Image: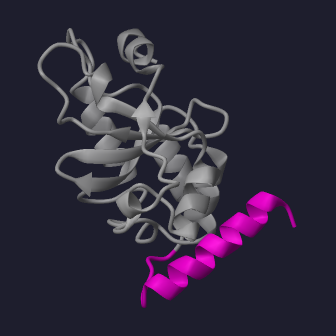
Amino acid sequence: MTDIDDLVQRVALRAASDSEVLPASVGDAQIAEAEGQLGFALHPLLVRLYREVADGGFGPAHRLLPLLGPGSSIAGEYLARREASVGVEHPKWPEGVVPILTWGCAMYAGVDCLSEDGQVLLFEPNPYSGGSWDGCWFLDSAGLAAWLENWLAGTGWYEEDAFDRDDLVEPQPWDQAASRLSSGA
């Protein structure tokens, strides 16, 4: 068993213990439909989570969004944010970053599907004061696997007791935000 196999298995166990009823997982057809709508491939670990664990409904705090469907979903949220970012002077959502959960107050966790490790980003619009949105993007985790490990260990910045710990690692400004927002990629 690889480390990723073990991680997916531990996520599945935690998801099942946190929720009495999880949504059914998705199949190849739903993955293909989502990727067709998005115009790019989802990060492989994200695909495994939706295929092997559930169609959202698990994870930190507000839980992962469903992949497709009416209402809030990964594909729907991404397409709405990208549409609002195309052809404007100051786009706010970069290409390839899919929102996977909302933290509330217009804050999102997103996975950068264009990065090898699937960086997990935090979009936090409160710093916005007009002009560029790049100051609203933060690197939450260098990769989706590490982000999931933090959730499993209860060490994420979003945990209730996070600010009482000496080892808290808060999201840092995303150094690629300006270039990714201005390039459209």
Asked whether the viewer can see residue 7, the reply is yes
Image quadrant assignment for residue 40:
top right
Q: Position of residue 106 (x, y in %)?
A: 19, 46
In this view, which residue lies farthest toward the front? 166
Chief SS of the magenta region: helix
Q: Look at the image and say whether residue 17 sits in the magenta stretch.
A: yes
The one of 117 and 69 positioned closer to us in this rendering = 117
Q: Position of residue 184 (x, y in %)?
A: 40, 15
Is residue 100 positioned above or below 58 on the image?
above
The one of 25 and 100 positioned closer to us in this rendering = 100
Q: Look at the image and say whether residue 13 sits in the magenta stretch.
A: yes
Residue at x 57% of width, y 30% of height: 114
**Region rendered in magenta:** 1-24
In this view, which residue lies farthest toward the bottom? 20
Residue at x 58% of width, y 71% of height: 53
Is residue 132 positioned above or below 114 on the image?
above
Image quadrant assignment for residue 11:
bottom right
Is residue 39 positioned above or below 46 on the image?
above
Q: Position of residue 19 (x, y in %)?
A: 43, 85
In this view, which residue lies farthest toward the left? 130
